[in-house]
Image (cartoon, rainbow, N blue to C red):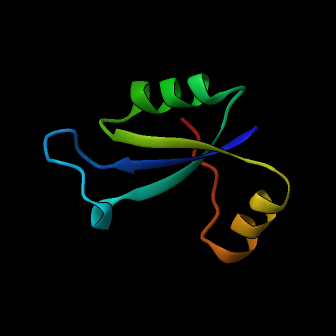
Amino acid sequence: MIFKVFYQETKERNPKREHTHVLYIEAENEVAARKLVEDNTPYNIELVYPLEGNHLEYEKEHTDFQLTEF
């Protein structure tokens, strides 16, 4: 399953919406997706959101959709 992960680049500053970034990752479930990002980056994860069906197609067509691999 594909997940959209919203994150801040550092855990040292307070999160601000203007500094939120997104990456797309493939994992078995939300817990596994969060663990992959936590284990491989210093990012402060805000939200892990599953993408499927129309939501996934929209992201592929209207964003810079690129799966991140660790």
Task: Give residue 41's position: percent from left, percent from top.
Answer: 36, 35
Residue 25 position (above or below residue 65): above
Q: How many marks?
A: 0
Q: On the rendered structure, is 19 left or right of 69?
A: left
**Point 29% across, 62% down: residue:** 19
Location of the N terminus (image quadrant): top right
**Point 60% across, 70% down: residue:** 64
Q: Residue furthest right?
A: 53
Task: Give residue 56's position: percent from left, percent from top.
Answer: 76, 58
**Along the line of sight, the residue nearer the viewer: 28 or 69:** 28
Task: Give residue 47's position: percent from left, percent from top.
Answer: 47, 43
Task: Give residue 36's position: percent from left, percent from top.
Answer: 51, 27
**Point 62% across, 72% down: residue:** 63
Residue 22 position (above or below residue 27): below
Q: Residue furthest bottom?
A: 62
**Point 25% across, 58% down: residue:** 16
**Along the line of sight, the residue nearer the viewer: 34 or 15:** 15
Q: On the rendered structure, is 54 left or right of 35?
A: right
